[in-house]
Image (spheres, helix red, strand yellow):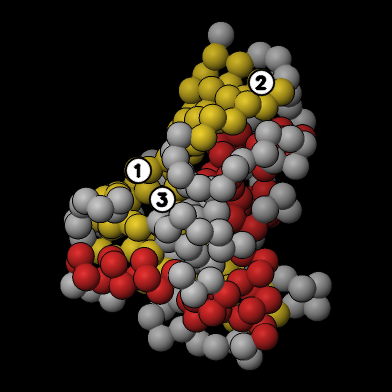
């Protein structure tokens, strides 16, 4: 017998980097929302991990370092998990973190701070919905749900989060003019992002914002076509 879980993508609507800690982690103050775009997890008896990539993005490893494998160990459970990926890997949309959070919810695991120990975004994804996220990601304050529509454009380029934070440090910690302090660092690290930003700007007539550390660009409203994806916000899983 198997159980099917939905793991919604998260969109970082705004992000301020409020400081760097001695251990190398950065503290943030961010607003995040859950989206109706998500991965599908099929959980059944047994052991092992299988990943089927149905979306563009980076390859996803099905090994002991995968966030789902970490979540199973944290919850003290074993299962065979098939992850059917719809959220592009490396897109800044928290696909892997949401997969892990879905497993923790399935296992009845509710310790948000412990969830952050396997991945900073796992804590938020465990709570879901709309929330203010602070600390290194382990402090999650639920906010009232707002029904919103966004259009996403995810370039086929890698934008590794650790490297973006290092570049932010190297640049002297710039403040983002468009609600995301990491945007200039990500564009400096991966200049190709600018072309995709401009493409979405031309299609929407808006100035796109970068989702977290990248590389997805987004605007509010519906602008389908040309590789763009229209998504809507979701309330938390418990709602």
Tag count = 3
**Looking at this rendering, what residue extends furthest in the top direction?**
1
Instruction: Say whether disc 2 or disc 1 marks the residue closer to the N-terminus.
Output: 1
Residue sitting at 19 percent across and 57 percent down?
223
Q: Are marks 2 and 3 in contact (CB under 8 Å)?
A: no
Q: Are marks 1 and 3 in contact (CB under 8 Å)?
A: no
Residue that label 2 marks: 80
Residue sitting at 46 percent across and 44 percent down?
56
Residue that label 3 marks: 34
Q: Quadrant of residue 79?
A: top right
4 versus 38 height, above or below: above
Q: Indicate the secondary structure of the residue bearing disc 2.
A: strand
Q: Indicate the secondary structure of the residue bearing disc 1.
A: strand
- Mark 2 vs mark 3, foreground winner is 2
Q: Residue 112 location, x and y as percent?
A: 63, 51
**Quadrant in which the N terminus is drawn:** top right
**Looking at this rendering, what residue extends furthest in the bottom direction?**
172
Q: Crowdedness of circle 3 by 10 Å Cα count: few (<14), some, many (20+)?
A: many
Checking the image for residue 44, the label placed there is none
Residue sitting at 44 percent across and 40 percent down?
55
Q: In the picture provided, is 48 more to the left or to the right than 151?
A: right
Report whether residue 129 is seen: no
Q: Label 2 to label 3, Cα distance in Å? A: 26 Å
Residue that label 1 marks: 36
66 versus 162 height, above or below: above
Residue sitting at 70 percent across and 80 percent down?
20
Q: Label 1 to label 3, Cα distance in Å? A: 7 Å
Q: Residue 29 location, x and y as percent?
A: 53, 73
Q: Are marks 2 and 1 in contact (CB under 8 Å)?
A: no
Instruction: Say whether disc 2 or disc 3 marks the residue closer to the N-terminus.
Output: 3
Q: Label 2 to label 1, Cα distance in Å? A: 25 Å
Q: Nearer the viewer, residue 32 or 225?
A: 225
């Amino acid at each position: 017998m198997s159980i099917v879980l939905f793991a919604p993508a998260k969109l970082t609507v705004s992000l301020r980097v409020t400081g760097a800690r001695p251990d190398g982690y950065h503290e943030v103050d961010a607003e995040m929302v859950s989206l109706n775009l998500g991965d599908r997890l099929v959980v059944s008896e047994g052991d092992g991990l299988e990943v089927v990539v149905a979306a563009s993005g980076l390859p996803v490893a099905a090994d002991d370092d995968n966030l789902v494998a970490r979540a199973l160990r944290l919850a003290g459970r074993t299962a065979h998990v098939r992850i059917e990926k719809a959220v592009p890997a490396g897109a800044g949309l928290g696909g892997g973190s949401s997969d892990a959070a879905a497993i923790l919810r399935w296992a009845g695991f509710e310790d948000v701070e412990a969830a952050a120990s396997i991945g900073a975004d796992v804590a938020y994804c465990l709570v879901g919905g709309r929330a203010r996220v602070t600390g290194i990601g382990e402090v999650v304050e639920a906010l009232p749900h707002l029904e919103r529509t966004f259009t996403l454009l995810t370039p086929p380029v890698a934008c590794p989060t650790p490297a973006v934070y290092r570049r932010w440090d190297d640049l002297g910690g710039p403040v983002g003019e468009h609600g995301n302090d990491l945007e200039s660092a990500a564009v400096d690290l991966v200049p190709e992002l600018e072309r995709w930003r401009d493409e979405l700007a031309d299609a929407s007539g808006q100035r796109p914002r970068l989702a977290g550390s990248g590389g997805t660009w987004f605007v509010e409203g519906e602008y389908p076509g040309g590789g763009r994806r229209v998504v809507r916000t979701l309330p938390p899983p418990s709602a």
